[in-house]
Amino acid sequence: MTDLTRRQRYDRQRRQRSVVIAAVSTAVVAVALVLGVPRLSGWDDVRRAFFNGDVLKASFPDLLRAFVLDLKILAWTTPSVLALSLIVALGRGARSPVLFPARAFAVAFTDVFRGIPTILVITLIGFGVPGAFDLHRPWNSPVLWGSVALTLSYSAYVAEIIRAGIDGVHENQRAAARSIGMTGGQTMRSVVLPQAFRAIVPPMMNSFVSLQKDVALISILGPVEVLRRAEIQQGRTFNFTPYVGAALIFLACTIPLTRLADWLLARQRRRVGGTQVA
């Protein structure tokens, strides 16, 4: 009991020292930036071009209204990515010879869409599909096909995360399920997938943080979302501050999601007995 108390006291002191060191180093860097950056010879020009308060105040409401479209696209692409990536992961992990075509298709899908840059996938699908099939409204919507392109691109990455989680479940779990008479489908639904998803939540969160940012790539197809609105405002004011405003809006969403992913990862490490950085 005494040894445990000493260990807890040591760990607490170590954490406190780490916090103090981190706070001091952060304060030193912040002071250096605050005092040093304004002394740069070109800072006044940079401030006027990128950090103009009047331009930001005038353009920010329009940027927020345009960001609603980004949130809508994210809202329907997220479940689509989850569903398609799960299907692809299950197809790639299929063990029956009868399902070899599904496994081959899953391998080809992940190889193709992980090998092509997302912006190129959006360009090819967003412009190519409506043009090739001569689609008319509403089926030629750039929002629709941009969302399809994002779903295909990100599903390839998330499918590999899910497959890694499935492969990480020990084979003994499947054997135990078969020993009590569970079918392959029942084993996957009730035994393998629940354990796999608990392990892959943090990396999946990071993927969806990236998806939230890459929604802005749909702007190349023409929809006036926040990035396109910033471009329009920049053209009107001949100032780059609207881009900074758009970046702040994205940061307001991505930073909390990133911290949530970090918290989930730390909790996962504690649960499996991994070490935690002080």
Image: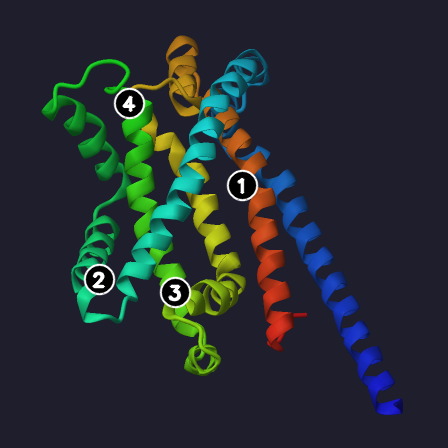
Question: Of the residues under marks 3 and 2, which one precedes in the sequence?
Answer: 2
Mark pair 1, 4: CA separation: 24 Å
Q: What's the residue type where badge 4 is placed?
A: Pro
Which quadrant of the figure contains the C terminus? bottom right
Residue at horizontal 63%, vertical 71%?
A: 271
Of circles 2 and 4, the one toward us is 2
Mark pair 2, 4: CA separation: 31 Å
7 or 23, which is in the foreground?
A: 7
Determine whether label 2 and label 4 are within 8 Å by CB.
Answer: no
Q: How is the image coloured?
A: rainbow
Question: Of the residues under marks 1 and 2, which one precedes in the sequence?
Answer: 2
* Residue behind mark 2: 103
Question: Of the residues under marks 2 and 4, which one precedes in the sequence?
Answer: 2
Determine whether label 3 and label 2 are within 8 Å by CB.
Answer: no
Q: Tag on residue 185?
A: 3
188 or 258, which is in the foreground?
A: 188
Residue at horizontal 59%, vertical 18%?
A: 53
36 or 74, which is in the foreground?
A: 74
Residue 266 is situated, as x and y percent measured from the top left of the image, at 62, 64
10 Å crowding of disc 2: few (<14), some (14-19), many (20+): many
Mark pair 3, 2: CA separation: 16 Å
